Image: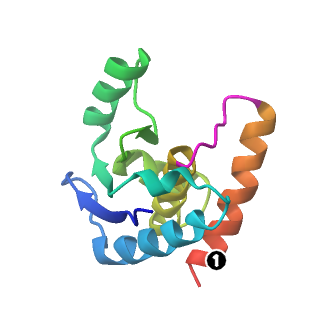
Amino acid sequence: MSVAKISVLNLQRMIPMKRTALQRFAESALAICRQLKKKSALTKFDKISVLLISDRRMASLHRRFLQTRGTTDVITFQHGEIFISAETARKNAARFRTTLHRELSLYIVHGLLHLDGFDDATAAGAEEMKTLQEKILAAAME
């Protein structure tokens, strides 16, 4: 059984980041996610990368891989990459009256759940992911 390492990389320059705090959060969240299922799909990864990028780069990925125009908050690729738009996270943090750190943490958890095989394409799946996200966020932020 493989134990994935997770790394948080800041590849954008628009939004100041506390990368080390996000790194610590990501490590805690990964440990919690591994315990969700008896056979976690997270064990297939040697490395998981969380990449903080600009809206421009996210819009490019969104169009190229999902054939959708415009930016989005997070895109997860099943080979272990979680791309997060720092600009969208900042906008959503203001919109939902939360901190940038919490919003980015939410996206990390969301990406980890997708890597673990959870899907939010249906209403039931979305509700399950939302419940798990809140539980993991609360536990990993302690």
Residue sitting farthest toward the top: 67
Span of residues in magenta: 116-122
Q: Is mark 1 on a helix, strand or loop?
A: helix
As for residue 6 lying within the magenta part, the answer is: no
Left or right: 59, with 134 as reference point: left
Residue in the picture at 43% in, 68% down: 26
Q: Percent from the top left, x then y, of residue 15?
A: 28, 58
Category of crowding for the residue at label 1, using alpha-carbon neighbours closer than 10 angstroms: few (below 14), some (14–19), many (at least 20): few
* Residue closest to the far right: 124
- Residue drawn at (49%, 75%) of the image: 28
The percent coordinates of residue 121 (x first, y second) are 67, 29
Image quadrant in which you'd find residue 138: bottom right
Relative placement, left or right, of 97 versus 48 is right
Residue depicted at x 43% and y 20%: 66
Q: In this view, does 3 lie above or below 123?
A: below
Query: Would residue 91 be found to the left or right of residue 96 on screen?
Result: left
Quarter containing the N terminus? bottom left
Is residue 117 inside the magenta stretch? yes
Q: Mark 1 points at which residue?
A: 139
The image quadrant of residue 71 is: top left
The correct choice, above or below, for 105 with respect to 39 in the image is below
Badge 1 amino acid: Ala
**What secondary structure predominates along the stretch shown in magenta?**
loop
Point out residue 21 in the picture as x, y percentages from the top left corner.
Answer: 37, 77
Relative to 18, 111 lies left or right:
right
- Nearest the viewer among 63 and 120 is 120
